[in-house]
């Protein structure tokens, strides 16, 4: 019984005989009593729910909803579960929190929501208006092949669409939503625009069909408006479009549900046609017009049309296909209403495939019926397949065959009107969703909707597109263009499935299994081929529009993250490239300087990052490393990482950012140098700024800096130290507007923000203050939260803000007082971003370290900002009497390296004693760093060390004299870094050498390679 007192027994939700037990320790209770949730005792009314007994969250659907969903996920964070010192969650508040009211949607099953809509859209126009025309102009066999061919394309596309639609819950947007969330915003935006136009064109197609039927009825009564032809068609189409727009703006969108009634009318009309065919001609007039009933004569006449040449048959076949193909495009009608389906994962595959099978069967049946009962009695029209004419109009074909022709005419009017209205409603909704996704900044204006949710602006745009397609006034004139547009949509749907199947991301788990990636690829290629067969001009225009839309999105880089297969493909390609790179042997010709820059936060030392970028730009790897002294929470580390990446992206620096916390500078730098990188993509050079306060800092800090140099050389990494007069660390003198920076990088807004500036401080050893870390963490987290809330508010007001020029950069850097920085500070920050004045890069190649001291300045000279700076090379002669030989030897070596230089100077008097002024300068430099007596705690420069290293010290003093003499006016000085020998040269003495060389000089880069060749003269 005592062991059972620590358990909680939950009643099984499956049955009374099988019980599921969860054994958990009660929270904050030393001797918890046994608690039976299924007990019926008198005290059971006071028991707590299982959710109140643990911080853990049970598996629930709400935990996996989108963050913008109505139901908010209540899963605790990892910090809340793992860290006991955090405040406990208020369980009772969560449990008693009232659920947010949700608007109950009208959900439909697969028959009403998909099948009926698809059949009405598929049969609405072509079944009675153009099937007989196709059979009579191309022949019965050719007509059946056209129907089967169109059905095969739509079946392949439906299989692909079913796979995509069952790979997750679909929202509103239908085809656009599927492709954009599968292939990404680039392809999704293209298809969103093209598909919206296709739906508007389909609306115009059904309107023209409606007007054609009205015109036929008017002619039977000898009525007309203007000319009884094209002008009447245009007037009727414009009036019908205006009526649909008024009905839509009047709020009829959510009230009209007539698809089922229209489908019943269509079925009645089909039965009417079959009954009429079986009954046969009712009068001699019908026989004279071609309806002779079922007869072998009609079959023999229609089964193969007598074309004079094969080219005539091909022209007839493909023209008939282009006219008929829009008939089978209606299988996407149910997908457009994906947000209204009860279970879209099952409804779309079932409804789409069933509708294609049923409609194709009826189309073939009607084609066989026409080919078996109708004969063209007028030889004048036998070869008139190029243009439709009154001889093949519905009143002279299907209208004759039907037992009661007014029923067919009523069916055509009702079905075309319903189909046109459905397309007219769908096109603005798809376009509105595209606009609300903010993929095209210039189209967001059309995403506006009124209080009832009606996209008024998109409705008006759709109306304009519909009118443009109606203006030709001829149904057959617009059908090939519509076929081209729908084929491009089908091509992208098939390619989406192929791409997702090829990449195989972990999230690709469609429940629909009856698809094949190679069949999808074949369907996509077939659609593109048919676009050119039908009309190569229209195909070029369509594909050109898709390409232009794709390039616009690629340039704008919208801030969307949909987990697409394109993202998975990027990861897969990168992974494969890294694996392949491992098997590539290193060669000196392929050497690339890969930098690890110890910057702290990248925004703290901008000029150091800019200088490193000059070396690696479009060439090799750049990694910014930040060493954070105090342990930090993961949320705080994520904020630092996000800000650093935003800063790099804003300045168009292709680099990475890594950080390590809870360690000092020495251990952190060692860890970064040993662990950063992947395979061959590992830094081979560590770049750090010069420690200008070395004579003021503690011995511990100085030794840590010195040990970093030792560790880099121990692991055979090259070392570079950069010094500029004003220093590199600006973390205490600038503020970064992090909100504005985030919006500019992610292109969420293009206007100036008035939010307060947030200071992105570096938490490296040199900038850590005495401020409590938890207080600083709370401050930054609160700022980040307020920033995200402000961005959500400003997103809704983006249309009302003034636009900036696309090339105009917003000033995100301010002084600590919130005002613009002084010009001199801005010049120092942007020192390596600006075009350098005409001058020189002086290379003091003192010792052969493998050639890195020569290679880095050469790379800098190839950059546009440094193109006006010539290389001047300084080197040391072995003996004075070998000056000419040494000069010719170095010149020959540089020529073989194919490195262009302007001057070459060989130093012969390096061993000469320094001047008294230089000696006095050095004594004054190290005076404050000498120990103050034998028992002094200051680990400074001892006299014994100065005596032992006197020769080397004098050499560096002499180098300073030569630098002042030759390189005082250089744009940049690059010199071989003196070797810091372990256990021989102390840190303080070594730093005094570097101070002697670099103090008061132009920008100075000290370089020490790893003694491996990085230059070669072999081809």
Image (tube, rainbow, N blue to C red):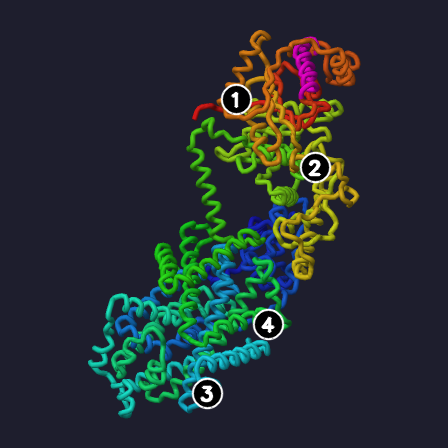
Q: Earlier in the sequence, mark 1 or mark 3?
A: 3
Residue tagged 2? 829
CA–CA distance in space, label 1 to label 3: 91 Å
| In front: label 2 or label 4 | 2
Residue at (48%, 59%) from the top-left corner? Answer: 545
In this rendering, the count of numbered labels is 4
Residue 571 in picture, x, y percent from top left: 48, 45
Residue tagged 3? 224
Residue tagged 4? 454
Q: Give yes or no for residue 108 being in the magenta stretch.
A: no
Q: Is residue 809 left or right of residue 587?
A: right
User: Which quadrant is home to the C terminus?
Assistant: top left
Residue 249 in picture, x, y percent from top left: 59, 76
User: What secondary structure is marked by label 3?
Assistant: loop
Residue tagged 1? 894
Q: Earlier in the sequence, mark 2 or mark 4?
A: 4
Q: Which residues are magenta?
A: 946-966
**Image vertical order of residue 563 relative to residue 730, above or below:** below
Q: Is residue 438 left or right of residue 550?
A: right
Q: Is residue 412 left or right of residue 34?
A: left
């Amino acid at each position: 019984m005592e062991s059972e007192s620590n358990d909680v027994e939950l009643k099984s939700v499956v049955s009374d005989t099988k019980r599921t037990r969860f054994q958990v320790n009660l929270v904050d209770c030393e001797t918890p009593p046994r608690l039976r949730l299924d007990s019926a005792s008198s005290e059971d009314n006071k028991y707590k729910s299982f959710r109140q007994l643990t911080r853990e969250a049970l598996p629930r659907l709400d935990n996996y909803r989108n963050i913008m969903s109505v139901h908010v996920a209540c899963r605790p964070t990892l910090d809340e579960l793992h860290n006991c010192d955090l405040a406990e969650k208020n369980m009772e508040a969560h449990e008693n929190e009232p659920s947010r009211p949700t608007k109950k949607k009208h959900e439909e099953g697969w028959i009403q929501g998909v099948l009926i809509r698809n059949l009405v859209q598929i049969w609405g126009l072509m079944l009675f208006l153009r099937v007989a025309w196709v059979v009579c102009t191309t022949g019965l066999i050719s007509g059946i092949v056209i129907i089967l061919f169109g059905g095969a394309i739509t079946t392949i596309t439906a299989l692909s669409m079913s796979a995509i639609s069952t790979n997750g819950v679909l929202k509103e947007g239908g085809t656009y939503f599927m492709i954009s969330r599968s292939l990404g915003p680039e392809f999704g935006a293209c298809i969103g625009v093209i598909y919206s136009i296709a739906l508007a064109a389909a609306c115009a197609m059904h309107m023209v069909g409606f007007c054609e039927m009205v015109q036929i009825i008017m002619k039977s009564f000898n009525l007309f408006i203007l000319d009884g032809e094209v002008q009447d068609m245009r007037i009727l189409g414009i009036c019908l479009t205006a009526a649909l727009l008024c009905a839509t703006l009047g709020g009829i969108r959510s009230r009209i549900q007539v698809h089922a009634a229209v489908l019943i009318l269509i079925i009645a009309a089909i039965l009417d046609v079959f009954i009429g065919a079986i009954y046969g001609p009712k009068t001699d007039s019908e026989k004279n017009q071609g309806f002779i009933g079922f007869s072998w004569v009609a079959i023999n006449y229609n089964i193969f049309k007598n074309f004079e040449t094969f080219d005539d048959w091909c022209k007839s076949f493909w023209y008939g296909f282009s006219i008929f193909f829009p008939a089978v495009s209606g299988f996407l009608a149910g997908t457009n209403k994906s947000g209204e389906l009860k279970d879209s994962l099952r409804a779309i595959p079932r409804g789409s495939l069933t509708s294609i099978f049923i409609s194709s069967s009826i189309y073939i049946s009607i084609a066989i019926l026409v080919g078996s009962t109708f004969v063209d009695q007028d030889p004048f029209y036998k070869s008139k397949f190029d243009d439709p004419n009154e001889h093949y109009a519905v009143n002279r074909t299907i209208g004759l065959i039907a037992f009661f022709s007014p029923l067919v005419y009523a069916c055509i009017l009702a079905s075309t009107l319903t189909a046109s209205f459905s397309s007219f409603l769908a096109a603005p909704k798809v376009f509105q969703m595209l606009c609300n996704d903010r993929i095209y900044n210039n189209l967001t204006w059309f995403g506006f909707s009124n209080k009832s949710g009606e996209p008024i602006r998109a409705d008006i745009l759709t109306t304009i597109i519909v009118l443009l397609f109606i203006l030709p006034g001829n149904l057959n004139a617009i059908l090939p263009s519509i076929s081209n547009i729908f084929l491009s949509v089908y091509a992208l749907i098939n390619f989406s499935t192929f791409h997702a199947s090829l990449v195989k991301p972990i999230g690709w788990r469609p429940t629909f299994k009856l698809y094949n990636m190679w069949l999808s690829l074949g369907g996509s290629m077939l659609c593109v081929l048919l676009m050119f067969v039908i009309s190569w001009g229209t195909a070029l225009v369509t594909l050109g529009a898709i390409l232009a839309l794709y390039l616009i999105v690629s340039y704008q880089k919208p801030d969307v993250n949909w987990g697409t297969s394109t993202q998975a493909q990027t990861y897969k390609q990168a992974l494969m490239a890294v694996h392949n790179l491992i098997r590539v042997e290193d060669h000196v010709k392929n050497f690339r300087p890969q930098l690890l820059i110890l910057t702290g936060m990248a925004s703290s030392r901008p000029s150091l990052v800019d200088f490193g970028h000059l070396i690696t730009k479009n060439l090799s790897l750049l990694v910014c490393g930040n060493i954070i002294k105090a342990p930090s929470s993961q949320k705080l580390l994520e904020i630092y990482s996000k800000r650093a990446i935003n800063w790099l992206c804003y300045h168009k620096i292709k680099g990475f950012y890594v950080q390590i916390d809870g360690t000092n500078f020495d251990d952190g730098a060692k860890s970064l140098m040993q662990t950063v990188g992947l395979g061959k993509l590992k830094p081979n050079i560590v770049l750090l700024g010069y420690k200008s306060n070395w004579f003021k800092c503690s011995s511990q800090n100085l030794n840590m800096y010195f040990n970093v140099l030792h560790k880099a050389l121990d692991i055979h990494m090259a070392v570079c130290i950069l010094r500029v007069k004003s220093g590199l660390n600006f973390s205490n003198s600038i503020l970064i507007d992090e909100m504005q920076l985030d919006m500019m990088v992610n292109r969420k807004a293009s206007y100036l923000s008035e939010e307060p500036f947030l200071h992105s401080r570096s938490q490296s050893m040199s900038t850590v203050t005495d401020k409590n870390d938890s207080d600083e963490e709370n401050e930054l987290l609160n700022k980040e939260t307020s920033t995200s809330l402000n961005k959500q508010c400003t997103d809704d007001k983006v249309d009302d803000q003034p636009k900036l020029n696309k090339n105009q950069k917003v000033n995100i850097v301010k002084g600590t007082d919130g005002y613009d920085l002084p010009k001199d500070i801005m010049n120092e920050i942007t020192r390596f971003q600006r075009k350098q004045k005409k001058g020189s890069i002086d290379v003091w190649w003192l010792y052969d370290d493998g050639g890195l001291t020569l290679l880095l300045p050469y790379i800098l000279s190839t950059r546009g900002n440094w193109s006006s700076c010539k290389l001047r090379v300084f080197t040391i002669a072995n003996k004075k009497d070998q000056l000419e030989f040494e000069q010719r030897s170095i010149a020959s070596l540089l020529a073989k390296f194919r490195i262009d230089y302007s001057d070459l100077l060989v130093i012969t008097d390096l061993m000469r004693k320094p001047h008294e002024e230089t000696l006095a300068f050095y004594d004054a430099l190290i005076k404050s760093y000498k120990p103050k007596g034998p028992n002094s705690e200051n680990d400074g420069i001892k006299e014994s060390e100065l005596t032992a290293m006197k020769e080397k010290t004098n050499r560096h003093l002499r180098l300073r004299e030569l630098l002042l003499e030759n390189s005082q006016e250089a744009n940049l000085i690059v010199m071989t870094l003196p070797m810091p020998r372990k256990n021989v040269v102390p840190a303080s003495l070594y730093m005094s050498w570097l101070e002697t060389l670099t103090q008061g000089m132009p920008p100075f880069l000290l370089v020490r390679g790893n003694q491996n060749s990085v230059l070669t003269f072999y081809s």
